[in-house]
Image (spheres, grey):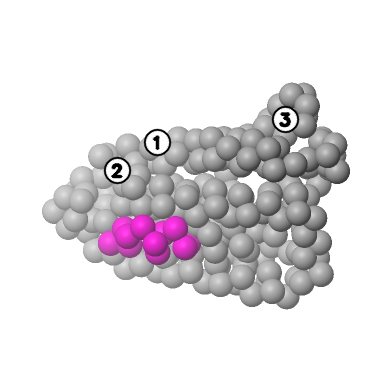
Amino acid sequence: MSPTAFAAITAAVAVAAITPGPAVTAIVARAVTDGWRPAMAINAGVVTGDLLFIALAMAGLSAAARNYGSLFDVLRVAGAIYLAWQGVVLWRARPSGGIEGAASRVTRFWPNYSAGLLLMFGHVQAMLFYAALLPGLADFPTLDWRDGLLLAAMLVVVIGGINTGYALLAARARRFFADERAQRALHRTAGTLMFAAAAVVATRV
């Protein structure tokens, strides 16, 4: 893969990553209520999904998104349900004396990682994005495992880095929500964001 093609692919991925979507919404909602660590678990799930998608695109299996649409519909709905449940948890969270006590308690790594991965599994457009991007910008038949590793490293740095920036900015906002009324508003705003992300994932075709 030529340096020009790699630079073009990197730029396209960066633009897509920095544009707020369901993944960014979920990461921000988790970071602003529970801090950056749980948000980074969602980020890890999102990046894993992107890595799987680009691997499928390079393997020529992206047609599965079109040929087995019902399977991806099930995965998309599962992801939407999980995000909606996270929204319910946030809406029902009770404020307490401090911001740490106001956390929604969905702070373990695997539930949040699974949420990010499920979100991506329901995002068939991401797979089609890579399936269209690689042949359009690179000499697709000549791509080998070294190009795959290079692209994987780029995805981790670009997508993971941009999402980390969103998570850190959102986590910093937590300090401004120390009283109970602000905590309640924070939780309900974050819960609404989760519902919005679930709706977007569920209605994508």
Q: Earlier in the sequence, mark 2 or mark 1?
A: 1
Residue that appears at 81% across and 61% down: 63
Report which residue position mark 2 lands on.
Answer: 174
How many numbered circles does the render carry? 3
Report which residue position mark 3 lands on.
Answer: 6
Q: Secondary structure at mark 1?
A: helix
Q: Earlier in the sequence, mark 3 or mark 2?
A: 3
Residue 160, disc:
none
Q: Nearer the viewer, residue 203 or 2?
A: 2
Which span of residues is magenta-colored? 105-115
- Left or right: residue 128 versus residue 174 is right
Q: Nearer the viewer, residue 189 or 53?
A: 53
Q: Residues within 10 Å of mark 3 (few under 14, many from 20)?
A: some
Report which residue position mark 1 lands on.
Answer: 169
Looking at the rendering, in which quadrant would you find the N terminus?
Answer: top right
State whether residue 125 is above or below residue 74: above
Distance CA(mark 2)–CA(mark 1): 9 Å
Please say whether residue 151 is visible from this viewpoint.
no
Distance CA(mark 3)–CA(mark 2): 38 Å
